[in-house]
Structures are given as structure tokens and as C-alpha cells.
Image: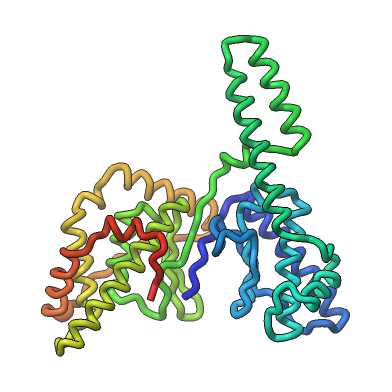
Amino acid sequence: MERIITARSLRLDKAESELTELGRSWERTLISKGIIYAPLFSALIISPSPEGGRLGYFEAPSRLIVISEAVLDSASASDARSIMLHELAHALDYALHGFLSGHSPSFRECCRMLGLDPGFEKSRVRLSAAERNGRKDRVRKLLALSSSPFENEASEAIRKAKALMAKEGIDLEEDSEERICMVPLHEGRRFPFSIRMLLSYISETTGVYIVTSSCNGLKTAMAYGSLDEVEASIYLYDYLVSSSRREIAKLRGDGERISSDSFLQGVIASLRERTADAGTDSALMVIRDGNMRKAKSIVFRDAKLRTTRTRSRGGDASSYGRGRSFGSSLDIGASRRRRELKSD
């Protein structure tokens, strides 16, 4: 399962819709000219933390275009459109040749076909975005000075802040808009009881709000929260699943018969005993409630969500006990600090 953290807000949804329509418009033009015969990209998403800190990229196998939230926060509208066309050119290059040729002559020809300046470089957008962020910081400092007890200094600070905001088109209200990040944690045609326990434990421990949806028989559990919270949920999920798999493989290598479902149930039960206050921690409860409210207002505005409860149907007692013993030795604090930990 490919994991990409995405961000949602009313402003980001609008920008995503506009950039998607830009791409679809070029698709229709290219199809009408007989240059291509199928859509160039499957979807476009906005990510607060694209792989490698990139401003955008095209993922060939999934034909997904990812645009960094930083582009929409700090770059101009024309730069954001150019980033989209740059990635669309990669998609066109892939559609025409069956592979990504990098920034080759054939890629530059694709840029020309899409009306993008062949000399356009994303590094320039990165620089201009950094400069725009600097100007935003300047506005914030000026507005802070507006509360100065010295009347002349305060009025001059307000005048300069308004002039800079008008000149650069800066709107600080965008920074305070409610947003939420989301990431898929688990995907499968069935969710064993141990996985449901694990997702519940992660919600209790990190504060993310988790929703499971189903499409064409495939279920996906999505975590919703701040960037730090959803990142923590990824690392915690991956750490517990991968470390449990390694321990199960070791035990089976020693000749023991281990049920992975019962083993993981034991791990989570042990961890819950060690963090018994997590489920009732008032600060975490406030965070979970806040994430639930934001997810419902931003993502699930027109959807009905329902709460389900399931019970364990029993399992292998020996595997469960092995899991409890293993869970008592895990260093969860250390695992959540390992930001580079990857899933098996």
C-alpha cells in the first residue's frame, strides 16, 4: 500500500479542483488531436510533506500527480499552474513513450505541447516561495508592532503591513483556515480483530480520528489529524506490525505454532495495560474530538458516519500469551521518534 499524506481544507479543495480541471482540459485537447487516447493522470492530490520535500511529482505506476501544499501556500497562482503543467508533461512523456525520460528533449517537447515555457524550472518556484514566506513573516512582525504603546510607531507599522499585503497579495487569514491531514493506515478485504484493536489503540495514543471506508470490497482505514499526529500514527502502526511480524517469524523458526492474529491481540493488550491512561487522557480526548469535528466538517460534509463495535471471537491462547510477553518489552516512545522507520 502506497502511503501519501494529504491535506484538506476548503481552500486546498478549491485549488485541487482548479488544477485538476487544468489537467483534464489539456487531456481533452490532446485526445481531440489524436495525440493520446486515454487520461494522462488518475488523480491529483495536495500533500503537506511530499517525498523528498519536492514541490510536485508524477508517480508513473499509479499515474498520480502530487503537488506540495507549500506551492499553494507560498507560490503565485501562475507558478502553481506551471508546476501542474510540469508534472502533466511528465505524465504525457510517460503516456507517449512508456517510461519517464527525466528532463530529456522528449520531455521538453511535451512541455512545449502543453504551452509551458521550456526554460521553466521548479527551483525558481522554490526560491520565489521562500521569498514570499519571508515577506509573510515581515507582515506578521509589522502587525505585531501595531500593538505598540507608541502611537506613531503603531500607525506606521499598520501602514507598512497593509501596503506590503496589497502589493504582494498576501492574505494571512489563509494561514488560520481549518485544515486536516489524512493518510491510509491499513488496507485489505477484511480487518482481523487484532487490526481493529491496533487502530483503536493508535487513535487513543496519538489523537488521530480513524474512519474505515469500503469500496469494491476493499476496506481502507484512514487516520485524520495534524501532520505530526498522522505521522506518529504511521510510525506507530508500522513499528508494531513490522516488529510483531519479525518476532512471529523468529518464533515459527524455532518450531512454535503461532497465530499472527492472536499474537498481535496480545501485543496490543499488553501495551494498553502499560498506557492505561491513554484512553481517558483529557488532552488526547480533546485532540481526538477536534480531529473528528474537523474531519466531519471538511471531508465528510455530505456523508453519514456510523460507529460499530466488534468483539473478539477467541483465538489461540498460547499465541496471545506470547504476544503479551513481547508487548511488555517494546519501547513505544523510541519507535515514535524514529521518523525514518518504514513499513515492511
Residue sitting at x 68%, y 79%: 100
The answer to whether residue 189 is above or below residue 221 is: below
- Residue at point 67% right, 20% down? 157
x then y, percent, for residue 307: 36, 61
> Percent from the top left, x then y, of residue 263?
20, 76
The C terminus lies in which quarter of the figure?
Answer: bottom left
Please indicate, yes or no, whether residue 116 appears anywhere in the rendered image: no
Outermost residue, right side: 33
- Relative horizontal placement of residue 156, taking residue 259 as reference (left or right): right
Count of marks placed on residues? 0
Can I make out residue 145 in this image? yes
Q: What is the quadrant of residue 50 in the picture?
A: bottom right
Q: Nearer the viewer, residue 82 or 189?
A: 82
x then y, percent, for residue 281: 26, 46
Q: Residue at x 68, y 83 (%)?
A: 99
Q: Is residue 142 above or below residue 259?
A: above
Q: Is residue 259 left or right of residue 82?
A: left
User: Colour scheme used in the picture?
Assistant: rainbow
114 vs 39: above or below: above
- Residue 176: % across, % down: 56, 39
Which residue corresponds to the image point at 58% horizontal and 24% vertical from the top-left? 144
- Residue 311 sits in which quadrant? bottom left
> In front: 276, or 124?
124
Q: Nearer the viewer, residue 232 or 101?
A: 101
